[in-house]
Each structure stands twice: as C-alpha cells, then as structure tokens.
C-alpha cells in the first residue's frame, strides 16, 4: 500500500518551521536533540503555486537550507537536524528534487557545487560530458547547417554523460557525516508513497510541447485522457525508488554501470528519430573534477568582500565578476533604488550602466569561455578576465548612449584564435544553498538543461539535454573555430553561478546564492549580490527586486515591474528594450544581525516554489 503523504510531522518541527517563516524567528531551545538514527518523516504537503507568490523571508540561528521545492527543503532540513553536514543535506535535497521537480534537475543531469569548510573553498564539477563518439558536427543537419534548437534538444542526441551523482559521491567522501544510504531515505520514501503534484509541475507539463512524445514520460506525467496530472494528486514513482535504492546501496556505480546504465544507453541510442551516441564506456568512465574556485575581491565603501564562484566550464562567475567589477568603475553606486510598479526597482540611470557592463561581459563570455580542459584561457589565466585594470579599461567603453552590441576585449597580449559563439536559448535548472552547524556552507546549481531535459524518461528519471549548451555551429562563417564547439569528452559551457561571499578580513561566510534561468542566471545572481552587498537588502528583498539584463543584444526587463518612464529613458539612450517574463529561481542565505543576534537570513524566489528551513 502506498504510504499516505499527509502524515503529520513531529510537532517540534511544525513549531520550528512556522517560526522560521517569520524574519525575526529564533529557534526554540530543545528542538535540536540529535536522534541516534535518522528516520525520515514525510511532511504535510501544501500545494505550491506558480506565478508570483510573496515569500516572507526567513531567519535561523544554527543552520539553514534553501531549495526550490518545500519537500526538497524539508528533506535537507531533516538531515541537518539529524547532525548531517551541508553536503549530506544537499544530497538529500537533490534526490528529492529528482522526484518532485523533475523538470529542472536530477540524477540524469549535471551540477556545480561550491563548498566552503570555513577555511577552504572547493569547486566540485559534476558537469555532463560529450560522448567519446560525438564530434563537432553533432548538431549539424544534412545541409551542414545547425539544426533548429529543439530538433537538437528532444531525443537521444543531446544527452550528455550525467555527472551529478558521481560528483555528490566525491563531495560526500570528503565532507559527509551521515552514511550515504541514509541520505536517500527521504526521496525513496516519497517516491514509493507518492508526492503531491505541485502547481508549477502541473503548469509546465501542461505547456510542454515535447514531453508527451516519449511514451514513458507520457504515461508518468499525463492522465489517460492526455491532460497533465492534476495539482495535488498523489504521484508515485516506484521505478525511481528502485534506482535510488540501488544507488544508496552501491554508490554511483549503480547508475554508471550495469542495468541502469544499459537502460540509459538503450534510450539514447535507440531513439526512433533522433538517436544519440552515449555509450556504456562513456557512463562508466565519467569523472567528476575538483577545480579551483574563481574568487575576486569586491569592495563596497570601506567593506572588502571576497566573492567566490564556479570557474569554467561555467561562464557564471566570470560574467558576474566582470559586471560587478565594471560597475565599480562607474558612478552606479551613486544611483539608489527607486519606486517600481511592485516594490523598489533600479533606476533607468543604474540600469543603463548595468546593461552596458553586461554587454561587455557577455561579449567576453561568447569569445572565451569553454571547458578549460580543451581551451586556453586568455592571457594564460581565467582571472585575467577579472583583473581590475582590464575591467577599468572595459568600463571606459560605457558612454551616455547604449553601445547596443559590445565587442570582446583582449586581456592579454596574444589574440584569441576563437570566434564568438552565437547566443542560444537555455532554460530549466534549480539552485540549493545550505549552511550547516559545523561551519560548512555550499551553493549548488543543478540542471538537466531545458525543462524536462531531453524529454527522455528512463526508470523514473529524466535524461539531460546538456549537449545543447555547446555551440551548434563549430565555426563562424570564416571557418574560425568556436571555443565552445562539441568535442568528445568535453563539458559544455554553462551559465550556472553558484556563489559564496566572504568577509575578506575575517574569512567569515556572508552569503550563499544562485539561480536557474539559462544565460540570465548571470543577471539574477548579479542582481541579488548587488542588492545584498551594495544596497544592504535582506536576501528576500534582493531576490524580490525586478529582473533585468542584457545578453549583448536588447535590454531585457521583467514585465510589469518597471515604470514606463524607466523604459522610455532606456530607449532614449538607444537601447532596444524588451519587457518579458524573467522567471528566476533564486535561493540565497546571508549572515546578518537582527535582535542583537547573528542569524542566517534566507530568501526564496517568489517566482517559484522554493522555501527556506532551519533551526
Ligand atoms: N544548462 C544551463 C547552464 O548550465 C542552465 C539552464 C537553465 O538554467 O535554464 O548554464
């Protein structure tokens, strides 16, 4: 019999959670007793909503977890409460996300995890890789031209070797406190007993054009009449439960070798219209990597911060760092927030400076950033793109009128041999921020790339379409190679920007944050950092700010959030302005003072279903 999903949670936790909903909440004494053995309790499952739902902001004392779905957050919370580390909690959160937010991330995808022990910052790279048999023609049609984007996405062709589980296993070996298998309990229990379909999942299933084409996904996500499963209905996933049980017992080998690996390969290679090249050897050979985090100094008035992000193959930290660094060379700091249509919003003057800085950053991103195991950084180091002198030069290109399209810069003496990559769409993804009671903190952004990935379901989980983050075109019109072209074994360039901010003087962790949103991840993350560090906002206030950006084209503004005068003022400066839906999914935790105490302040994006929990 499936277990009921509405069983009551222990009363202590109910109190803790409801208190933690108040920004001034402080944990009650006596709630944190450590159970000798972890026993997962299925929480009550409120029906989430899509659209814009105000979030209260949270505050906790000892530890906190912020994730994109209440069940996932709760799993992380229970692990932290049972004495787990931040890494332990992240594993529990990720496994539950695979089940309850399958559109965004999961064991069939990849992730970047930035982890701090309080002394060192480590960057765990679980990015997918291209199969050994893939080459730069992977996304070219018979005519030698790039295929339309979704012709690349849907099917087996776009599926990269998943990296999330193996990366988490590596991080757990180094920083886990609870046994690996314990961390799978929440997801296994929920997969067996069922979880309530959230409004967001229902909305996305309903709207998706491609998911139904896979008969396995169709049977799971849709009713017999072809409609999406209703909001609040109990959805069980026993196949995923069995997979998770096997990974819990045997480790990542259970996913990368044997019958599950074979099922993945069959699904990819035997796709009826768009097969891919992923092989058993690719799966078995996947290696997560530990990289050096990319950190730079950032000063706001007299305060010195150290901002750490994920290095290539992500472009996130470089672009966020460039935007912040270029803005420092302008008078952006003198331009405060003003009234928007719904709360505060940046002024047109500030937005002009920001979007110009963004154009410059995106020009460099397109020119330079790709898998560091395959391409050389300009001037011999990725940090050259963040060098203060280089950014000061770049800032000089910002004038009163928009440059509309920026050209890449040249931080070193040697000119790059690469051509810029054209812009390509990206959607999906989930962000997790956690601080534990032991002084560890993490920011992990995790993805299957597009929503529902490649739309290929195997044994209860979805396969990624991460290979479409490569440039479809291997060269420009002149035949000059593009750095981020497909090559065997290579990791596609990402925009994911998990970020940790420290007090430079003391080393104290001040912030963990990140977002989904494709290339706009860079803007959502930069906005939140600027809001907290420069404008002194709580993480919730910073996340609530309207979204904006430019990918080195039009100026993008979140629709219905900016006064018409702001839009007009930007147009008067020559920018093409597009108002559009900009659905970030930010989660952030900051260190703050309230009521004479040091607290963890948490924020979750009102545009999605995330919550923060902690004690
Ligand atoms: N696949 C994208 C990346 O790694 C993220 C997709 C998204 O957030 O929508 O940058």
Image (cartoon, grey):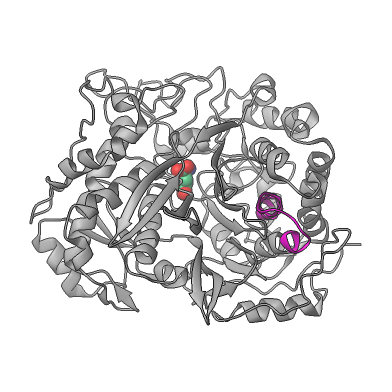
Residue at point 17%, 47% (across, down): 395
| Observer able to see residue 292 | yes
Q: Which residues are magenta?
A: 78-98
Question: Is 209 placed above or below 285 here?
Answer: below
Q: Nearer the viewer, residue 368 or 79?
A: 79
How many marks are shown on the rendered structure?
Answer: 0
Residue at point 30%, 40% (across, down): 386
Question: Is 315 placed above or below 505 here?
Answer: above
**Picture quadrant where residue 437 is located:** bottom right
| Observer able to see residue 581 | no
**Left or right of 266 on screen, residue 410:** left
- Please state the horizontal and vertical placement of residue 152, each as a whole percent of the image: 47, 34
Q: Nearer the viewer, residue 526 or 532?
A: 532
**Picture quadrant where residue 474 is located:** top left
Residue 406 forms part of the magenta stretch:
no
Question: Is 586 placed above or below 370 here?
Answer: below
- On-image quarter of the N terminus: bottom right
**Picture quadrant where residue 609 is located:** bottom right
Residue at point 64%, 22% (across, down): 282
- Please state the horizontal and vertical placement of residue 106, each as a whole percent of the image: 64, 46
């Amino acid at each position: 019999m499936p277990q009921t999903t509405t069983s009551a949670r222990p009363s202590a936790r109910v109190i803790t959670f409801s208190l933690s909903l108040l920004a001034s909440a402080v944990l009650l004494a006596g709630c944190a007793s450590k159970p000798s053995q972890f026993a997962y309790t299925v929480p009550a499952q409120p029906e989430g909503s899509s659209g814009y739902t105000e979030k209260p902001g949270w505050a906790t004392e000892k530890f906190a977890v912020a994730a994109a779905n209440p069940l996932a957050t709760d799993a992380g919370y229970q692990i932290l409460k049972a004495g787990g580390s931040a890494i332990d909690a992240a594993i529990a959160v990720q496994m539950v996300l695979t089940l309850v937010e399958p559109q965004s991330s999961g064991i069939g995808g990849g992730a970047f995890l930035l982890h701090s022990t309080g002394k060192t910052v480590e960057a765990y790279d679980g990015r997918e890789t291209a199969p050994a048999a893939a080459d730069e023609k992977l996304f070219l049609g018979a005519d030698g031209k790039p295929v339309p984007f979704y012709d690349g996405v849907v099917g087996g062709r776009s599926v990269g070797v998943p990296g999330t589980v193996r990366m988490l296993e590596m991080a757990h070996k180094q920083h886990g406190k609870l046994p690996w298998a314990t961390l799978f309990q929440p997801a296994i229990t929920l997969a067996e007993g069922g979880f309530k379909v959230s409004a967001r999942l229902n909305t996305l299933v309903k709207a998706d054009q491609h998911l139904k084409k896979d008969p396995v996904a169709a049977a799971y996500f849709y009713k017999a009449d072809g409609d999406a499963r209703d909001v609040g209905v109990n959805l069980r996933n026993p196949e995923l439960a069995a997979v998770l049980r096997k990974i819990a017992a045997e480790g990542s080998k259970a996913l990368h070798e044997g019958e599950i690996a074979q099922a993945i390969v069959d699904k990819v290679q035997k796709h009826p219209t768009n097969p891919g090249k992923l092989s058993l050897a690719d799966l078995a050979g996947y290696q997560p990597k530990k990289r050096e985090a990319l950190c730079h100094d950032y000063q706001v008035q007299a305060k010195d911060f150290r901002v750490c992000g994920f290095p290539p193959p992500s472009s996130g930290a470089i672009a966020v760092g460039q935007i912040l660094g270029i803005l420092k060379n302008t008078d952006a700091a003198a331009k405060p927030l003003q009234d928007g249509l719904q709360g505060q919003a940046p002024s047109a003057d500030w937005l002009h400076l920001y979007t110009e800085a963004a154009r410059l950053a995106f020009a460099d991103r397109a020119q330079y950033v790709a898998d560091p195991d395959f391409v050389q950084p300009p001037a011999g180091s990725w940090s050259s793109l963040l060098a203060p002198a280089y950014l000061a030069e770049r800032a000089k290109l910002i004038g009163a009128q928009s440059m509309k399209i920026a050209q890449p810069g040249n931080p070193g003496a040697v000119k790059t041999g690469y051509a810029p990559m054209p812009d390509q769409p990206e959607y999906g993804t989930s962000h997790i921020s956690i601080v534990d009671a032991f002084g560890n903190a993490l920011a992990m952004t995790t993805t299957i790339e597009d929503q529902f990935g490649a739309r290929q379901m195997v044994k209860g989980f979805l396969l990624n379409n991460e290979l479409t983050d490569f440039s479809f075109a291997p060269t420009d019109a002149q035949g000059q190679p593009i750095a981020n072209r497909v090559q065997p074994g290579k990791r596609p360039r990402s925009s994911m920007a998990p970020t940790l901010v420290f007090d430079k003087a003391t080393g104290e962790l001040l912030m963990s944050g990140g977002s989904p949103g494709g290339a706009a991840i860079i803007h959502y993350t930069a906005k939140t950092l600027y809001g907290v560090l420069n404008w002194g906002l709580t993480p919730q206030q910073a996340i609530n700010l309207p979204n904006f950006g430019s990918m080195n084209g039009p100026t993008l503004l979140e629709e219905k959030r900016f006064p018409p005068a702001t839009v007009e003022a930007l147009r008067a400066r020559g920018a093409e302005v597009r108002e559009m839906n900009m659905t970030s999914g930010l989660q952030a935790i900051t260190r703050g003072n309230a009521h004479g105490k040091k607290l963890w302040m948490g924020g979750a994006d009102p545009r999605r279903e995330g919550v923060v929990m902690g004690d």
